[in-house]
Structure formats: structure tokens, C-alpha cells
Amino acid sequence: MNHDYVSCFAEYIKGMLDARDALGYAREPHAATLLSFDKYCSMQHPDCVELTEHLVMPWVLKDGNDTKGIKGRASAIRLLAQYMNISGQEAYVLPDRYFGNPKPKETYIFSDSELSSLFSAIDTLPEDKKIPYTRQMLPVLFRLIYTCGLRPQEGRELKRRNINFQTGEILITNTKKKKERFVVMSDDMLMLCRRYDKMRQFFYEDNPYFFPGSSEGPLDGQWLNRQFQKCWQTVNPGVPKEQLPSVRVYSLRHQFATANVNRWLDEQKDLDAMLPRLRAYMGHYTLKETAYYVHLLPENLSKNRGIDWEAFSEIIPEVEPWQE
């Protein structure tokens, strides 16, 4: 989406977004956030031509109880200020991690029995009154994310035209850093998608998304995660919500990666050769992102004598799960 920036910082906002776009980063959500800043400047400080602390802080701290919003504004304005300084225009840069370190998201790996119970709960989710036929839709979507190792938005925003129902190939376009890639469904998954597609075409013929939501768009991400959380609570009856291990739809992608690494270890495959394949399939930008999953299998690794630990110490990063 293109935004019209009109303040004295418009040139730098557009330049920063264009530079990030050239590097493969998405323009949103920073483009929309900086549009808010642009309007704030043009309406309340039309004569201000310097990006100062006095100008920045009231905008960043508006809606003081909205922690997520504050962090989003802080991140966007920090990037803008850094770009301005690089461009030769002095600007105030918020200190790094000004509003504290983000809490790492736990990476929870399901046991086989937990995963089986979870999909049983998904298969029995009640129909959502606002979105027709979610009982048929969600079992397919969650299985597709898991069996193909997709990022949740890659599954939600999958267009029907990007699926080859003959070969099982899927073109993934809504990717991190805009790296398109192909993944191939298993035969079972392909048969499931074919059956679902017959129903989908009858009720959602005009919606381009394979998993339609409301208003001719895809399913909402927050709504989808709430359904996943409901299923997780269903398979853990009697356990208070706050005591349950933290899981999210993205956990299915973690499960896919660790299951593959685990299987290769059991089969005594050469991880040096296999990890680059997993990297390409999952759409990771670097091998370090893929090697992160080796950290999640310490017991199996300790039993495997065929691993070159020196080589892996060089590529396995000290990475937090929220960076993926």
C-alpha cells in the first residue's frame, strides 16, 4: 500500500522505506506507523524541520498503556532517525532497546501423543458463525502449515492459483524478505486439499485465497491463533491457562523442522548435507536460522557421534526464537 507523506520528513520517510524495500524487507508495518508520525508532524508541528527528542517522545509515548503500540512507534522512528543520520541530516536516535528487551517466545516441541490429541481437537472445533465452513477449513490449514513447515501467514494468505493440484507443488509468495519458493505436499496432504477444494470452490468461488476469511480476504491471524489456543486448552483439561506451556500456530513450523532433524539423526544422515535442503524448503534467509533447530534436540545430539561439533559451533547462532 502506498501512503502519501506530506510533512517536512516525507522525503526521508520515503527514502528509508525504499531502502528497506531494496534490501528485501517489507514496508509494513513501518510505512503505516510513520504515516501516523507524518500526520502528527504536519498538524501539530508544521514548522519543525529537525527530528529532536522533544518532537519524537510525545508521539512515541501517546496511548501510554499500549505497550505494543509504543514499541512499534519506537522501532519505526529509530529506523527513520538512523536513515536520516546516514543521509547527512542530524536526527535524534532513540537508544537501542529503549523500551526494554522483548520477552523471548518459548519454543515448545509437542510429544507425538500431544500432537495427535491436538489435531483431534482441531478436527472437532465448532463452526464459527462469522466465517462459514471453518470446521472443514481449519483441519486442512493447520495440517498444511505443519506438514510443509510454513510460516502461519504463508498458509493463511496462500492463493488458490499458486497450488498445483496435479503435482502437489505450492508457490509460496508471501514470504519473509520476499523470497519466493516452492514446497511440495505429501500425497496424503494433496488428497486432503483436493477434497477441501471441491467444497471451497462451491462456497468461496470469488475469493482468491485458499483459506478465505471475511470481506473477500484471508483468515485473520489473531483469530486463527485463538482457535489454536482453544485446541491446546482442550487437550489439557484441568490445567490453568497460565500454567500451560506457551504454544502458537508458529509452533507447528518448529515441529516440522525438529521432526526432520530428529529423523535424520535417527537415520544417521549427514546434517551438513541435509540442513541446506531444509533451509531452502523452509525459506530461511541464512543457514544459521535453520541450524537453530539443532539446539532443540540436545538428547539426540549427544547420542550422535557423527556430528562435527567444531563445524556446528561456527554456524549455530545464539539466536532467540522471536527473531525467526
Image: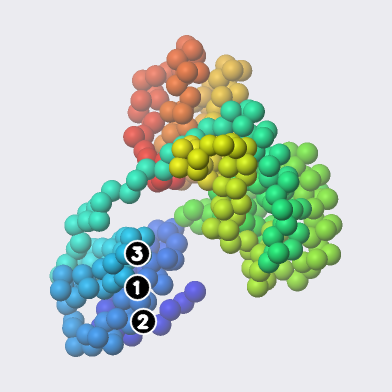
- In the picture of the structure, the residue carrying the numbered disc 2 is 5
Element on which disc 3 rests: loop
- Dot 1 crowding, Cα within 10 Å, few <14, some 14–19, many 20+: many
Q: Is residue 39 left or right of residue 231?
A: left
Q: Is residue 50 left or right of residue 35?
A: left
Q: Is residue 228 left or right of residue 284?
A: right
Q: Residue at x 41, y 43 (%)?
A: 105
> Picture coordinates of residue 175 (x, y %)?
53, 54
Element on which disc 1 rests: helix
> Picture coordinates of residue 233 (x, y %)?
58, 42
- Dot 3 crowding, Cα within 10 Å, few <14, some 14–19, many 20+: few
- In the picture of the structure, the residue carrying the numbered disc 1 is 34
- In the picture of the structure, the residue carrying the numbered disc 3 is 66
Q: Residue at x 47, y 32 (%)?
A: 293
Question: Mark 1–mark 2 contact, CB under 8 Å?
Answer: yes
Whether residue 83 can be seen here:
no
Q: Is residue 98 left or right of residue 22?
A: left
- Dot 2 crowding, Cα within 10 Å, few <14, some 14–19, many 20+: many
Amino acid at circle 2: Tyr
Amino acid at circle 1: Leu
Q: Earlier in the sequence, mark 1 or mark 2?
A: 2
Badge count: 3
Q: Residue at x 65, y 46 (%)?
A: 142
Instruction: Report how far apart the C-alphas of labels 1 and 3 lie in the structure.
Output: 17 Å
Instruction: Report how far apart the C-alphas of labels 1 and 2 lie in the structure.
Output: 9 Å
